[in-house]
Structure formats: C-alpha cells, structure tokens
Image: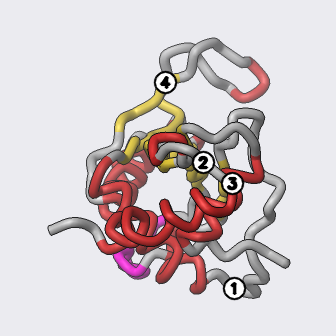
Amino acid sequence: MVARLKEHYRKEIVGALTNEFNYKNVMEVPCLVKVVVNMGVGDAIADAKNMDAAIAELAQITGQKAVIRKARKSISNFKLRAGANIGCMVTLRGDYMWEFVDRLFNIAIPRIRDFRGLPPKAFDKQGNYTLGIREQTIFPEINLDKVSRVRGMNVTFVIKNSNSAEESYALLKHLGMPFAG
C-alpha cells in the first residue's frame, strides 16, 4: 500500500506546484528525496549504554536501525578522541520516508510545548531544510518511562529539483509542514 502523503503528493501537490511555478514538465517539480535524522550522543564517551539507548530510541521513532557515527578528529577540550562514538543517524527513503514525514507533521510537531510554527528561514543554498527538535519525547512511539535522558535531534529534508528556497518552501508547505506566519 502506498503511503498516504506520497499519494497526496502525486495527485494534488505536483499539479499545484506546476501551476504555481509554471513548470513545463512534471520532472521539474521539486520532490522529497530523503530525510536524514541525526542524534548527537556526546555523553556516550563516558558511558556506552547511552549510545545503545539512543540507537534504540531512534529505531523506534524511524522504524529503521540507526548507524553509529564516529569522531573524525580529536578535540582535547571536549575529551574527545578520533574514532570515538559520538552520534547516530538514520537516512530514510521511499515509503519509510513518507510515513515518517506524515507522522512528524501531523502527530509529533503539534505535541511540542508552546509551539508557534517552524522558522521559514532554515533553508540552505540547495533548498534543503533542517529542523532541530529539542526532545525525542514528542514522538508517541517513545515510552516515557524508559527514557533515560532527553536528547535532541536534527531532521534534514533533502529536496531534489529545487532551484531556490521559495520552491522548497512551497513543497513543504503543501506537504503540511506548519511554518510560522
């Protein structure tokens, strides 16, 4: 079965973006390629169990096992050695990506305390959008009793065929991202 948001993108959003930006071909329309979820676990240097907990929580949130990221170089001020485990990440593509984006926009983000909308200026030069989340507990998949420490994460939406931040903004707005203003 095709993801609900993917079907909505194909049937309605492609046509709306084609009319809005006067694309000549359907292949010119901006499209979501992948979503990268990154969680820094700096306290894993002192205790390796923190990394295991972070990987388990990220797997519950995304439905895919996380990959451990290692430090590239040593930094003495942070007591960090090259090759030490300092984070974990998941790259979502296909139906997993569409399901995650649907749950993020419709279930998780509205659960943020004092939420007034996401900043519309977090686009880079290529049109990708990065969102910072302060707590992993906004996702309903996480059991609050088993959370040892509240951790933040970065979610990056990689968008193909976007020539500007305006096109990426329009795509994410049509997908249902709650921007401020």
CA separation in Å, label 1 and label 3: 35 Å
* Residue for badge 2: 23
* Residue for badge 4: 70
Q: Position of residue 61 (x, y in %)?
A: 37, 64
Find out whether the residues at labels 2 and 1 contact each other: C-beta distance under 8 Å.
no
Number of the front mark, 2 or 1: 2
Number of the front mark, 1 or 4: 1
Label whose residue precedes the other's in the sequence (1 or 4): 4
- Say above or below: 97 vs 178: above
* Residue for badge 3: 21
Residue depicted at 68% across the width and 62% down the height: 20
Can residue 158 be seen here? The reply is no
CA separation in Å, label 1 and label 4: 32 Å
Which of the pair 16/9 is nearer the observer? 16
CA separation in Å, label 3 and label 2: 6 Å
Q: The magenta stretch spans which residues?
A: 140-148
Graded by Cα atoms within 10 Å as few (under 14), some (14 to 19) or many (20 or more), the crowding at tag 2 reads some
Graded by Cα atoms within 10 Å as few (under 14), some (14 to 19) or many (20 or more), the crowding at tag 1 reads few
